[in-house]
Image (cartoon, grey):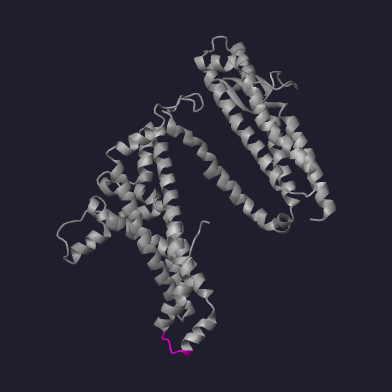
Amino acid sequence: MKVANAHKARLLALVLTGIGLISLFLPGIRLSNIRRGQEQSSVQISLFSLARGQVALPTDAYTSLFDYAKQEVPGVTITEDSLRLSDASALPGRILFAACALPLMGAMLHLLLDKKRRTGLPIALLLLSAFVTVSFVFAYINIAMIATNVRQFQLRPAYSFYIFLLSVILSLVLVALTDRTVYRQRYLFGMLMPFAVWLFVFAYFPMFGWVLAFKNYGPSDSIFLLPFLSPLYKNFADFISSPDFLLVIRNTLTLNLLFLGLLTPLAVLLALMLAETRSARFRKMVQTVSYLPHFISWVVVASLVQTFFSMDGGIVNTLLANLGLSDRPLGFLQESRYFPALITGVQLWKSVGWESIIYLAAISSVNPDLYEAAMIDGASRLQQIAYVTLPAILPIVGIIIIMNTGWILSGFDPYFLIGSSTNRDWSIVLDTYTFQMGVGKLRYGYATAVGMFKTLLGLGLLVIANRVARKFSGIELLR
């Protein structure tokens, strides 16, 4: 970006940052009294102001929300938590205001005073301010609704909250564009943004729910007002001491190790076979047939498995009976002893073709001069594969193995759809166990602890695999 345009962008970002700072004093929360589906009355309250809809000194908006609820419904329940929050109303508001406003003011000062036009600090400050504000708006909504204990109220962000978010987002974009590297690669960053937003919304933002692992949460409880467990690690201790702990860990590790241990060599073998095939028509046909299962939903796959392996008229049992290989139907879906082989085979059928794409691309990128040199030395096709192709794609294979290690504790769809109570000894894994505890038995805190345990253990396995690969082969994914 040219110097003049960069200066204009920084000035516009400065103006937008100021608008975001002012919006913190404008009505940011709207509380409505709903009766029979109609809004009877409403009040808009500044996020940091006692004056309803007016500019005022920072304080706690919770007090205004609570007072309004008492006026609309005289019999509103006043809980002990409500009294505690009301008595200490001024301090939280000032703290929240400082937490949101100071990063914004810091970004403004940096945009004004930094002559080297560095963008890292203002971007970090703008992100911090937006993150803190969004977090506390949801906290206010939760606290006010639970404390008033009246279901007829609807509480949601008002217009200034959206003004704040929009101004911060636009400021981030403008400040980022003043960086030369970002400006030169702005189209790449634009393509990356949808994925980054998706990742934040569906992967990082739900991590707020990890606090449930340290509470005994129920459907009618407030996440913020619910006290912490004593001891804090009670849910984790209950999981580790439960009779299902060793069973779930054994099933998860064994089945995933079996699947991933076969997936990589089979995918590499398929890629080598496709690369060596001379007929382009036959190669395309095999690629289509092998890739297609990846796009079939697990629900459809489970239906196909039921059709093939059912005891009552299943294709496999019918074929075995007609060939005289079995005098009675075999319970492939009912007996636990068949489940590991069945689930591994189904996952391999669905994944090998898709996984081979990466290795086929790696084989295609090998320098042809290496093959010509090997042919001059008298190497056969098998020797060329062993001494040229495989060493060339080994770094890609190592990286894929490291990445797969991070998913070694995951897997829900095939186990949930194909597993049953009769083969539970092998079909229950960490993800299905979490689902049963959370959705089935409403033990949300316990289920969150199990999920958190799985995430941390998977991260540890990923780091270990990365270090082992780096030590013995020089391949690494994480630095």
- Return the residue found at the far left: 327
- Return the residue found at the far front: 471
**Residue in the image at 66% along x and 24% along y:** 94
Camera-side residue of 420 and 197: 197
The quarter of the picture where the N terminus appears is bottom right
Q: Is residue 368 above or below residue 404?
A: below
Q: How many marks?
A: 0
Camera-side residue of 274 and 39: 274
Q: Is residue 444 above or below residue 336?
A: above
**Residue in the image at 61% along x and 20% along y:** 62
Please tell me whether residue 388 belongs to the stretch shown in magenta: no
Q: Is residue 382 above or below residue 134?
A: below
Q: Give percent across and percent down for residue 24.
A: 71, 29
Q: Classify residue 291 by image quadrant.
A: bottom left
Q: Give percent across and percent down for residue 240.
A: 33, 39
- Return the residue found at the far right: 4
Q: Report if residue 241 is visible in the image.
A: yes
Please tell me whether residue 379 belongs to the stretch shown in magenta: yes
Q: Classify residue 432 by image quadrant.
A: top left
Horizontal relation, residue 66 to residue 356: left or right:
right
Q: Report if residue 291 is visible in the image.
A: no
**Residue in the image at 16% along x and 61% along y:** 326
Q: Give percent across and percent down for residue 145.
A: 55, 22
Magenta segment range? 376-380
Q: Give percent across and percent down for residue 434.
A: 38, 40
Q: Magenta region, mostly helix, strand or loop?
A: loop
Camera-side residue of 447 and 148: 447
Q: Classify residue 314 by image quadrant.
A: bottom left
**Residue in the image at 74% along x and 35% along y:** 105
